[in-house]
Amino acid sequence: MNDSSRRVFASERGSSLVWVLLAVTIIGGLIAAGSQNLITSDRVVSREFTLHGQALNVSRAGLVDAFAWFRRQQVQPVLDFLPRRDLEAVPKVNETIDPSIGLVREFPIGGNLWGRYEVRLADPTEPDDEKNRLPVRDVSAERAVAGQGGVWLVRSWGFVYRKLSNTAAWNEAPNDPVASAVTATELRRLTIVPPANAALCVSRGDSCTIGNRGKLDGGEGSALVWPLSTGLPSIQGEILGQRTSLIAYDDSVPAVFGISRQDLESYADIRVSSVDGLPPELPEYGLVLVEGNAVFDAARPLRGTGILVVSGNLTIAAGSNSFFNGLLYVEGNVTIQAPSLVRGIVVARGTCSVSGVGDYAEIDYDAAIIDQLLVYMGQYRFSRAIYFPRQN
C-alpha cells in the first residue's frame, strides 16, 4: 500500500471512529434520559398510589365516624341522618364541621397534606343525587326490613389536598386537591325476637326431655314452649312456671334475629368452626357463632354473657360448671347436664335433653338479661364488608 492509500485509509478510519463515538454518546444520552424518565414515572406512580391509599384511609375513617354517630343516637332506630353542630349549646354539640353537607371532618396527614371526609346528606332537590353525590340513605324497604331506620346505606367520600391557605375552601386555589376515593357499607340493627318469652323453646314437644335434676324456671315468662300438634315433652324434673304449646311458633333465623343466615354470619363478633377457637370466656354482649358441633366440659366450660349460635349440636357435659347469661340458639340437638345454669333463653331446633345427677342442670328465663341484650346488641352493626362504589 502506497503513502496515498495509507492516508486515505487513515482518514476513513478516523472518520468511522468519530461516528462510532458520536453514536455511543447519543445512545448513552438516550439511555440516561430513558432511565431518568423511568425513575420519574416510577416516582409519579408511587406518589399517586400513596395519595390514593391515603384517600381510601380517610374515606374509611368517615365510615367509622358514621357508625359511631348512628350508635350513640339516643332515639333508636335512627330515622333521620342529621349530624348537628351547635357550639353555643351546653354541652357543646360538635358532630360535624359542616351540617349542611353531613358528617364532615378535616385533619392533618403530614406536612401540608390534609385529609377530609364527607358522609353526605341526601338532597331531594338534586335529580341525580344518588348517582353523583352518593349520600347516606335508609334502605330498610329494599332489604325487606319492616319499618324505617333498620338498615342504612352509608357512603363516605375521602379527599387528600394540599393546604396552602387557611382562608380559602379546601378545594379552592391555592389549596390543591390531589386524590379522592369513596367507600361504602351498610349498617343494620340486630333484633332479638325469640319464639316465646320462655326458659326453653323447642321445635317439637315430643323431642324434649326434662330428666331427673333437670330444672326449668319460667320466672315472669313461661318455663317451656313448643309448637302446637307436635306431641308432649317428657318431664321427670322440675318445671316452675307455665308449659305451653303455641299455634304461631317460628324459630327460624330471620324470625328470631330479623336477618338472613348469611347476614347473621357477617354480624358475628367471633365465628369459629369449633370451641377450640373460642376465648376462655365469651366476649361480653358479643355475638358468637360456632359453625359445627360445640362441646363444653370441665376443661372448657361455657361462660359469658351474650348470644351463642351453634349450627350443629350443643353439649354442655356433666361436671362442666357452666354459667351463661343470654340467648343460646342451637340449630341441632341440645344436651345440657349438671351442674350448669343458663339464665335467659334457650332455643333448640333439634331434640333437647336437660338432666343432672346429684346437682341440677337449670335454665331460668330472665327478662332483664334479654332486655340488656336488646340494649347493648340491638344497636347498629356493620352488616357487610366495606366496598368501593366508585374510585377517582
Image (cartoon, rainbow, N blue to C red):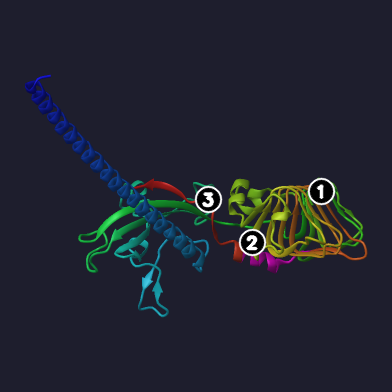
Counting every numbered tag in the picture gives 3
Q: Residues within 10 Å of mark 3 (few under 14, many from 20)?
A: some
Q: Is residue 245 visible?
A: no
Residue 150 in the image, given as x and y percentages of width and height: 52, 55
Real-space Cα separation, disc 3 to disc 1, in angstroms: 33 Å
What residue is shown at x 8% (from left), y 23% (from top)? 3
Q: Which residues are magenta?
A: 364-375
Q: Is residue 371 magenta?
A: yes
Left or right? Give the position of 229 relative to 174.
right
Left or right? Give the position of 148 relative to 119.
right
Q: Secondary structure at mark 3?
A: loop
Residue kind at label 3, given as amino acid type: Arg
Residue kind at label 2, given as amino acid type: Gly
Residue kind at label 1, given as amino acid type: Thr
Name the residue carrying label 1. 351
Q: Nearer the viewer, residue 134 or 219?
A: 134
Name the residue carrying label 2. 286
